[in-house]
Image (spheres, helix red, strand yellow):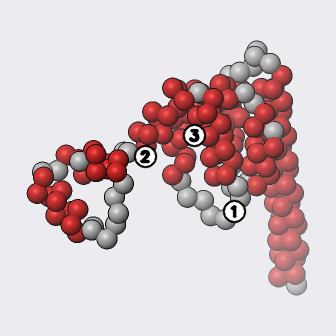
Amino acid sequence: RYTVKVQRELELDECALRALKEDRKRFLCKAVENYINCLLSGEGHDMWIFRLCSLWLENSGVSEVNGMMKRDGMKIPSYKFLPLMYQLAARMGTKMMGGLGFHEVLNNLISRISMDHPHHTLFIILALANANKDEFLTKPEAARRSRITKNAPKQSSQLDEDRT
């Protein structure tokens, strides 16, 4: 008899927990929607881009948020994302489980920002792309030759050969 009572309480608690999670997701989606609308409405509230990106990056695993950023977030002028370019570019290398669309939206956004503002963005992306090349370039010449011969099956690009 006691186990039946505890079982009912467990079911009620699980139902309440599901309702809270659904409410949280609904409020999150409404907040993202309103921040996007605020940023689209004009120049007076440009500082809200920080909060929008914070919500998006914290909830990158929520497909609804990624869908809203893909659909409506791409309408936001690209210059409003410039102060956040370091944070956005740093997320390019992260791995996500599942096909929730975060990296697709992020890469599309970064591409758009880079096309519109190359002088403000490309050095960030190039710095991240070449971050691990310093070690290779600063080793003594003999170590570099042995490493090159060790990795001979890999074809190096002309740019890498010009650097060495």
Q: Quadrant of residue 154?
A: bottom left
Nearest the camera: 4 or 119?
119
Q: What is the x, y in percent for residue 66?
A: 74, 49
Nearest the camera: 163 or 134?
163
Q: Give how far apart the Cα atoms at labels 2 and 3 are.
A: 14 Å
Task: Determine whether, in the image, residue 50 is placed left or right of residue 7.
Answer: left
Marking on residue 85: none
Q: Which residue is labeled 1 in the image?
A: 99
Q: Which residue is labeled 3 in the image?
A: 88
Nearest the camera: 157 or 145?
157
**Is the C-beta separation of discs 1 and 2 under 8 Å?**
no
Mark 1 or mark 2, whichever is nearer to me:
2
Q: What is the x, y in percent for residue 88?
A: 57, 40
Q: Which residue is labeled 2 in the image?
A: 129
Label 1 vs 3, first from the N-terminus = 3
Callout 1, which amino acid? Gly
- Please report the residue visible at 21 percent of the width from the left and 66 percent of the height from the top: 149
- Please report the residue visible at 65 percent of the width from the left and 25 percent of the height from the top: 79
- Please report the residue visible at 75 percent of the width from the left and 43 percent of the height from the top: 69
Callout 2, which amino acid? Ala
Label 2 vs 3, first from the N-terminus = 3
